[in-house]
Image (cartoon, grey):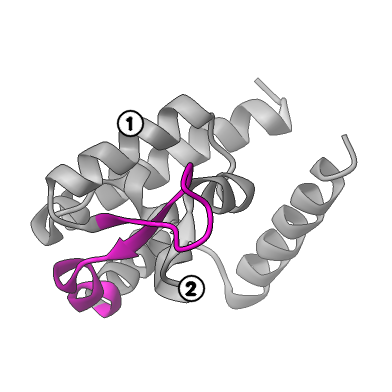
Amino acid sequence: MDSATYLASRMAKAFARALQQRASKLGFSPGQFPILLELWSEDGLTQKQLLERVDIEQATMANTLSRMERDGLVERRPHPSDKRAQLIFLTEKAAAIEAEAIEAAMAADTDLLRDFRSFERELLLEYIRRILENSKHL
């Protein structure tokens, strides 16, 4: 099928499969990776802030955070000024795997793009960025 969105969906699934084995050795799942990236960038976000930054459904976010808490990757702490909110913080375990996790994701990316020339890879990335920018206006 020559639908860009269909092919992009298949590409995302291929990336998740390529990351799965590497991630499981480090103690996280591909679905948790976007949340980890956001928290490595800025620790102590609320669930609402994470939802705004990671494009997943609220129920999925809640379930993923519960699994991450169970697996010792994050901990929830009371928000100092909003009794309804909690802040999500990385544990030492999650902080310690940052470099290896990013390396694992880059290796998965490299595997998927192994036959691409450098300029082809850069063009693909530019096209994907443009598509994502366009999606903000939908």
State the separation of the CA atoms marked 1 and 2. 21 Å
Q: In this orientation, which residue lies closer to the viewer: 112 or 102?
A: 102
- In the depicted structure, whether residue 41 falls above or below residue 85: below
Q: Is residue 32 left or right of residue 114?
A: left
- Rendered-image quadrant of the C terminus: top right
**Residue drawn at (47%, 47%) of the image:** 85
Indicate the quadrant where residue 44 lies: bottom left
Say which element carries label 1: helix
Q: How many marks?
A: 2
Q: Is residue 113 visible?
A: no
Q: Bounds of the magenta span?
A: 75-99
Amino acid type, mark 1: Asn
- Rendered-image quadrant of the N terminus: top right
Q: Does the magenta-highlighted stretch encompass residue 88?
A: yes
**Mark carried by residue 42:** 2
Q: Position of residue 60 (x, y in %)?
A: 42, 29
Q: Earlier in the sequence, mark 1 or mark 2?
A: 2
Q: Position of residue 92 (x, y in %)?
A: 17, 74
Other residues around mark 2 within 10 Å, as few (<14) / some (14–19) / many (≥20): few
Say which element carries label 2: loop
Q: Is residue 51 left or right of residue 47?
A: right
Q: Does the magenta-highlighted stretch encompass residue 133?
A: no
**Mark carried by residue 126:** none
Q: Is residue 118 visible?
A: yes
Q: Residue furthest top?
A: 1
**Residue drawn at (13%, 61%) of the image:** 26
Q: Which residue is mark 1?
A: 63
Amino acid type, mark 2: Glu
Q: Position of residue 15 (x, y in %)?
A: 40, 47
**Residue drawn at (20%, 57%) of the image:** 73
